[in-house]
Amino acid sequence: MASLTPRLFVPSTMDAWVYEDYGSPEKVLKLKSDVPMPEVNDDQVLIKVVAAALNPVDFKRMFGFFKYTDSLPPVRYGIAVVEVKVDFGTLAEYTFAEERMLALKPNNLSFTAAASLPLARETAHEGLERAGLTSGQSILILGGASGVGSLAIQACSLIQCLAKHVFGASKVAATSSTSKLELLRSLGADLAIDYTKENIDDLPEKFDVAFDTVGQCCEALKAAKEGGKVASILPGTTVPPAFEFVLTSKGSVLEKLKLPVLDPKSPFPFTKAVEAFSYLQTGRAIGKLVIFPI
Ligand code: NDP
């Protein structure tokens, strides 16, 4: 494995997780040590990867859910870039990205913390922005302990508001199973709702915005006020007037990143990527899973 110290020369091959067929991570994801380095164009930057977050889109892609729009395998490792065709990702010693997609890592964030933030935080931010959440409105986040949901709670709550992240909702409600309710409160939720005990569509109170990160559009619609907005990040699961979207990344939002939420099992070492994916697929991860060091 390459050292973390800056180097003047890059090697011609590298260690990378690769899949050559679609299927489950356990079956198709392989660690290879002779993967050619990516070729970088003038508007791209070669990146030495130190830490990388896993996102559900990564195993969905590996299973072939996007096979009609993505590059065909082999994928060296396709991760976290959702709006372009991808055959290189970040579970590799080196990768590349367009310069406009990048931001400097703040000094006060560890590599693990910094890797955990971009996709989930940008998705949370974009969802709140697209739903038009403004100061003083109420919001219900379905899936408050998820990677996106946990950061959406923070982005709306007073903590972030004081940090000049200005969504500043008047009331933030979020859902999870019983053991994660305390986490939701610690992130800034005023109301933590146990979905194993309460029916979301029977809640006595209605919300200006409902943000669905779990695929419960019908419940979200019932929880929204008349004329309220319902945003979903699960394309194909929405019913009008709810809307769905896919993240459009831009480096400028990365500069607003602040507070990571990491699963207690994070980080997983580079060699344990398959185990990390198995855990992510359970749908029970708390906040983000990160691979470190790479
Ligand atoms: P995670 O894998 O982090 O979600 C796991 C969490 O979801 C667990 O903590 C679990 O908590 C919670 N959860 C599962 N079911 C429910 C439920 N019924 N109600 C409340 N909470 C629930 O997911 P991500 O946040 O990373 O992603 C969420 C979805 O959004 C994925 O399908 C992903 O592919 C998609 N996505 C879409 C994007 C886009 O651009 N459109 C961008 C990013 C993600 P508990 O154990 O308490 O149930």
Image (spheres, rainbow, N blue to C red):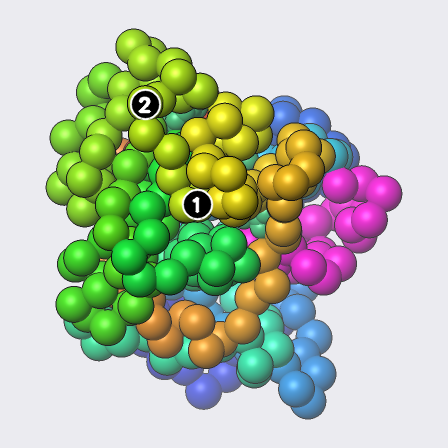
Cα separation, mark 1 vs mark 2, equals: 15 Å
Instruction: Work out which residue is located at the far top of the displayed protein and give it.
Output: 197
Q: Amino acid at mark 1?
A: Val
Question: 225 and 171: which one is in front?
Answer: 225
- Compared with 217, 136 (above or below) is below
Tell me the quadrant of ligand 1: top left
Circle 1 — which element? Answer: strand
Count neighbours of disc 2 (C-alpha within 10 A) and say few if under 14, some if 14 to 19, many if 20 or more: few
Residue drawn 18% across the image and 57% down it? 158
Q: Amino acid at mark 2?
A: Pro
Q: Position of residue 47 (x, y in %)?
A: 50, 73
Which quadrant of the figure contains the C terminus? bottom left
Q: Main secondary structure of the magenta part?
A: loop
Q: Position of residue 18 (x, y in %)?
A: 63, 45
Which residues make up the magenta segment? 66-89
Whether residue 265 is visible to the viewer of this picture, yes or no, is yes
Label 1: which residue? 209
Which quadrant of the figure contains the N terminus? bottom left
Label 2: which residue? 204
The answer to which of marks 1 and 2 sits earlier in the sequence is 2
- Compared with 58, 4 (above or below) is below
Left or right, residue 293 beside residue 216:
left
